[in-house]
Amino acid sequence: MRILALIILLFAPPLAAQERAPNHLLGQNSPYLLQHLYNAVDWYPWGEAAFAKARAENKPIFLSIGYASCHWCRAMAQESFEDPEVGAFLNENFVSIKVDREQRPDLDEQFMLVTQTASGGGGWPNSVFLTPEGAPFYGGGYYPRDTFLEVLGQINTMWREERPRVEEAAAALGDVVRTYLTRKAAARPFTPALASAVSQRMLGQMDDFNGGFGVAPKFPQESKLLYLLDEAERQGDPALLEAVQLAAMGMINGGLHDQAGGGFHRYATDNAWAEPHFEKMLYNQALITRLLVRLDGVQATPAFARAATRAFDYVLRDMQAEGGGFYASEDADSLDENGAYVEGYYYTWTPDQIRVAAGDEADFLISALNVGESGPFNGASTLRLEGFSGDQARLDAGLETLRLARMARTPPHQDRKRLVGWNSEMIISLVAGARAYNRPDYLAAAQKAARFIMGNMRNGEGYFRAYIDGEASIPAQLPDYAGFGRALVALHDADPSGSWLEEAKRIARYMLAHFQQESGVFRMNETPEGLGPFLPLDDGEVPSGNAQAQRLLTALARRSPDVVFTQQAEALADVLSGHALTFPEQRAAALAAVDAQNRGDVGPLRAVANGAVRVQARLDRAAGKVDFTISVAEGWHINAHKPLEDYFIPTDLQVNGAPLGPEAYPAPLITTLAFNSDTPLALYEGELRLSAPIAPGANLVRLVLQSCSNEVCLAPQNLSFSFW
């Protein structure tokens, strides 16, 4: 219970609040809920006790959803929930429920849609009003204290004097939201032409100057960027690649990137990525590093490799739990020298602070990092690299000096939940980073996290979602199962000798049995709550649950002879494409997953022949070539470049449509096999290495191979790789 005690201590209430008895959140383990334990509001956790009280007392419900590192959640708590007048009004006229959105993404997604539908906007804290039966009739976000009291008064009056109208509005709003959450869509093939049209439409929505999508507030929107990068690779399209590179460069050079400590903040409040909202979420670290590793692999960019490794190193240093796995987030706010919570205080600098910390290097750092005398954060500035082209080693040494100096400040609070879905994304990215940068410590951390989840978060045949203070809780949801299955596949690809793949297959079978609807699409919960079952199709902080389910089934179909995974992957792609094309900008991850099922994977590692053949591409830009390692399982082979029989498909390597000469291929093994004992065959077994030259500009490299066992030859595979 040491962590629980520390959380309570770190968020000790004001003296007046300390005189209050704890509310009904006592006994909860969520750091966010514990922040509200001594509020003036008599909070209940989500559950039947709160709804029974509302029905018994005929009161509407005030539902407040947020998370521990949320700046505006803390602001509303300090201004309203700790205020005696606000607390008294809520306690007299409402039943109040607190929900941690990170523990319950199912409730968060449903009720965020309620607020967006009712008010046209959304954000956290999400403030929703429900009937005693749980039907929502209005929603908003953060309210200043006086505005909040006005809203409460108006809703209380309506409830007392116009209840039939309120219930009518609740029925109508609930119908709209449920229809969206359980919508159906006709299957629609996702063709290459449609993929190109969608990518061009997204391209038109991007900021051509600063990079990224739209205007402030500007979020990374990693799923859309990864989809565009997929299409850039498939098509060899430099415009798509440059757009994704511009977005990534804006993020890593701006204040969104913690230049001193590594890692990334959640979003920017301006168009130029200079002024972030300072909380640091595990999922952003996972998805942005994945994007950077991919970009660096397509076209070598030292700035991308540097930012990716610094972010990985930050996660391993500051967010990794001792027993394995990674914590959820770090707060936007921290204590200043006067003991007040100030957003961004830990991360921002004045010139004088840099002079004290850096001594003779101060002027260089002030100039290189764009620190002005009158910064936007109470006179302080974020550290930014726009325009820097100097000595990188000198800069990195100075940044390390600043990182060490700021450790004297009170660090932001860390939310020490370990969430299966978010940890899964981090595992996948660490495996990619380990492969790209030859960092065995990244792979070791990923393996340790997976072992922690398997060893500590089992729930019978399934899994729990959250682990806090020694306790696993909250049944896992679709993104947890599909995400962890994908993470185990990534670990299998890095270490085929382990048992990762068997657990991934078991998880997929559990997911099929407990989450799949008759339509073939998957619902969010094993046991739905809130407004009922719904289909997670829209991307949120992580790719949608159905996009991840498609990725998992596709990956298993390519690594396992079990036909169930092949059949399910094909069937889901048919129906999921129709859903994704209905709202493509919101469902980019589903589009990418369907495209991977239909046209094959992108990236440096491919699995074919139900896992019997693995292809690893490594780019050697100094030598002007790409090296392929083709690993063939025992009992299997691929046909040689020049088979001895015309009906066998040869292994063939092409660059920009030009085939390589015979000297590019090793001498084949000439042998006979049981099924063809009278005729010798030319084939490759074991491990085969090929190289292809690349030139400046776009290089589309195609590898054709046909895999055969002693009994059957599979259809040929056409693998495409893009390098700039």
Image (spheres, rainbow, N blue to C red):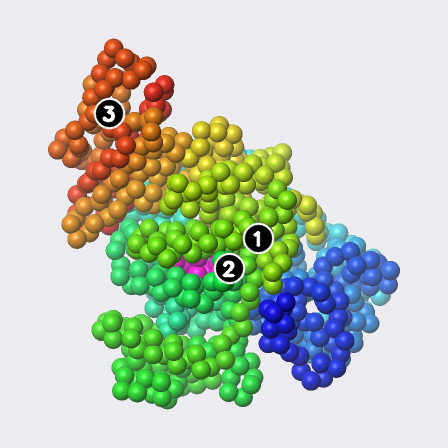
> Which range of residues does the magenta coloring cover?
282-290
- Judged left or right of residue 597, residue 246 is left
How far separated are the C-alphas under marks 3 and 1?
Answer: 46 Å
- Residue 208 occupies quadrant: bottom left
- Judged left or right of residue 383, residue 677 is left
Identify the mark nearer the N-term, 3 or 2.
2
Q: SS class of the residue under badge 1?
A: helix
CB atoms at circles 2 and 1 under 8 Å apart? yes
How far separated are the C-alphas under marks 2 and 1?
Answer: 10 Å
Which x, y percent locates residue 455? 55, 50
Which residue is identified by label 2? 323
Name the kind of residue labelled 2 in the image: Gly
Which residue is identified by label 3? 683
Please determine whether, in this image, residue 568 is positioned above or below residue 132: above
Q: Dot 1: few (<14), some (14–19), or many (≥20) neighbours within 10 Å? A: some
Identify the mark nearer the N-term, 3 or 1.
1
| Label disc, if present, on residue 456 of the rendered structure | 1
Was residue 501 drawn as part of the magenta stretch in this picture? no
Which x, y percent locates residue 335? 53, 81
Which residue is farthest right?
A: 56
Which of discs 3 and 1 lies nearer the camera? The answer is 1
